[in-house]
């Protein structure tokens, strides 16, 4: 099954159009995003999932790493997945205490530093003498979400990023390598312009990418901007794969052949399946037309955002477990019954209308399944204190480990 470029990027406008088409009964390709009443968090089960395995360990000497905006440790896992087992992560800087608890749960407490990045001096960062800086700055100033004002450098949440740029200009022991990840939209911002101007002035060689896990064999659309830079050698082997003169490569060198996405069923929990999600009538009858419904055999899913499980539109896909029934067969009945159900809801009376979608067995992807699609290893877990809502938010703010691991191999190839 091939995946079109349209499905790979899944821009918000097109996704919204698909959702609106559903409300008229024009359902195509199992595409119908989701609101919910949050059930209590349950103990997480670890499933035997066939996720990509780390490459062979690569000798990097004493590679010293600083993680900025470290979240739940995606960059750290990417280092391991890339084969750099002997790299030493000196510090992981993150202001979110819940994310730090998850990081410490998986990597130990000694690495995490819960400080405002802009509150620490250049001398503080200089003393680490790190070889590699990884960073995933706050995406809100650049995101394509409707609620974003796209203020770029004027957004207060970009302050720490510009502090790091100032630090790079002044410290004596600059990192040899840098890797940055952010949402699509960062490439059009003044923050990106300031970054590449600064890198060029300091003698760094850099490459920029817009990459999607779909092109790495992962059935999840998560188009992101990436920049890799190094001061040690030019990227002589890098051919920029551009479209319409864009400076942003869409394929990594050595990956000219796009990998066919695997089926979603390979990323689902098998040892312990939660029962189908029970949604309140208001969610069923008002919000179902906004869902992006996928089945285990499909090879794509929408990007999971931090609002998955809480809001409906454009936050991620919902799984239809029962593939024996097509949504196209039951959707006309749903539309016929919807007006009566909505009238009961408006009158604040019980909804005495049978839901024809129940046999589809629709549910949310579990946090473990979202982590699988982000290519986190099976030994990644959340502390018991992390609520279900927090797990979804943290995963929605994280990175795809496989994509970043490939970028790290490319960046550090000379080592």
Image (cartoon, rainbow, N blue to C red):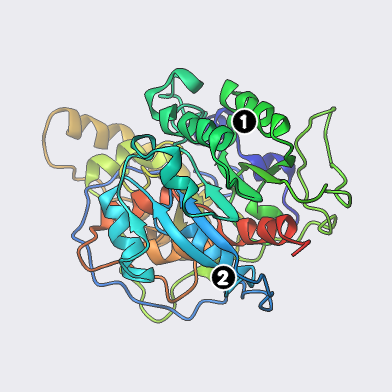
Q: Residue 400, how many percent across, how many down?
A: 55, 56
| Horizontal side of residue 136 vs 358, given as left or right | right
Secondary structure, mark 2, is: helix
| Horizontal side of residue 24 vs 173, given as left or right | left
Which quarter of the rendered picture does the N terminus lie within?
Answer: bottom right
Local packing at callout 2 (Cα closer than 10 Å; few below 14, some 14-19, many 20+) is: many
Name the residue nearer the viewer: 199 or 363: 199
Mark 2–mark 1 CB contact (< 8 Å): no
* Residue on which the image places disc 2: 80
Question: Which comes before the other along the chain, label 2 or label 1?
Answer: 2
Q: Vertical placement of 293 versus 343: above or below?
A: below
Which quarter of the rendered picture does the C terminus lie within?
Answer: bottom right
| Horizontal side of residue 125 vs 53, given as left or right | left
| Picture residue at 58% right of the left edge, 65% below the top | 79
| Picture residue at 19% right of the left edge, 34% below the top | 345
Name the residue nearer the viewer: 387 or 329: 387
Secondary structure, mark 1, is: helix
Q: Residue 122, how many percent across, how many down?
A: 45, 39
Q: Vertical placement of 413 versus 197: above or below?
A: below
* Residue on which the image places disc 1: 195
Q: CA distance from mark 2 to mark 1?
A: 27 Å
> In the orientation shown, which residue stands out farthest toward the left?
349
Q: Residue 202, how many percent across, how many down?
A: 69, 34
| Picture residue at 35% right of the left edge, 58% below the top | 112
Q: Residue 20, how many percent across, how many down?
A: 50, 30
Name the residue nearer the viewer: 35 or 48: 48
Judged by depth in the image, the label closer to the viewer, 2 or 1, is 1
Residue 408: image quadrant is bottom right
Q: Is residue 278 visible?
A: no
Local packing at callout 1 (Cα closer than 10 Å; few below 14, some 14-19, many 20+) is: some
Residue 319: image quadrant is bottom left
């Amino acid at each position: 099954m091939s995946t079109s470029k349209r499905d790979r990027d899944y821009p918000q406008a097109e996704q919204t159009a698909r959702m609106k088409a559903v409300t008229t009964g024009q359902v195509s390709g199992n595409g119908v995003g989701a609101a919910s009443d949050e059930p209590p968090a349950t103990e997480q089960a670890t499933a035997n999932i066939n996720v990509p395995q780390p490459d062979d360990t690569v000798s990097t000497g004493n590679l010293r790493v600083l993680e900025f905006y470290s979240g739940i440790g995606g960059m750290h896992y990417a280092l391991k997945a890339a084969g750099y087992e002997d790299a030493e992560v000196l510090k992981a800087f993150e202001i979110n205490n819940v994310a730090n608890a998850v990081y410490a749960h998986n990597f130990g407490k000694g690495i995490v530093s819960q400080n405002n990045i802009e509150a620490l001096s250049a001398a503080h960062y200089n003393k680490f003498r790190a070889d590699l800086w990884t960073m995933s700055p706050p995406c809100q100033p650049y995101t394509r979400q409707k609620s974003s004002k796209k203020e770029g450098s004027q957004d207060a949440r970009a302050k720490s990023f510009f502090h790091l740029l100032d630090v790079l200009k002044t410290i004596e022991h600059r990192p040899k390598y840098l890797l940055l990840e952010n949402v699509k939209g960062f490439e059009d911002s003044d923050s990106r312009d300031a970054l590449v101007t600064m890198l060029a002035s300091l003698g760094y060689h850099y490459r920029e990418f817009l990459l999607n896990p779909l092109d790495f064999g992962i059935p999840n659309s998560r188009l992101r901007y990436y920049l890799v830079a190094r001061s040690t050698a030019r990227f002589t082997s890098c051919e920029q794969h551009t479209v319409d003169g864009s400076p942003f490569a869409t394929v990594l060198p050595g990956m000219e052949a796009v990998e066919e996405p695997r089926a979603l069923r390979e990323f689902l929990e098998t040892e312990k399946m939660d029962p189908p999600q029970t949604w309140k009538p208001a969610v069923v009858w008002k919000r179902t037309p906004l869902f992006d419904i996928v089945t285990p055999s499909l090879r794509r899913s929408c990007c999971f955002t931090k609002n998955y499980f809480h809001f409906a539109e454009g936050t991620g896909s919902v799984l239809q477990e029962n593939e024996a029934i097509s949504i196209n067969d039951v959707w006309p009945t749903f539309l016929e019954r919807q007006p009566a159900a909505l009238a009961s809801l408006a009158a604040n009376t019980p909804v005495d209308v049978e839901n024809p979608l129940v046999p589809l067995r629709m549910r949310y992807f579990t946090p473990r399944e979202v982590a699988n699609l982000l290519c986190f290893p099976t030994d990644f877990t959340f502390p018991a204190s992390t609520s279900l809502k927090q797990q979804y938010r943290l995963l929605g703010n994280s990175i795809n480990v496989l994509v970043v691991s490939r970028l790290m191999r490319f960046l550090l190839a000379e080592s």
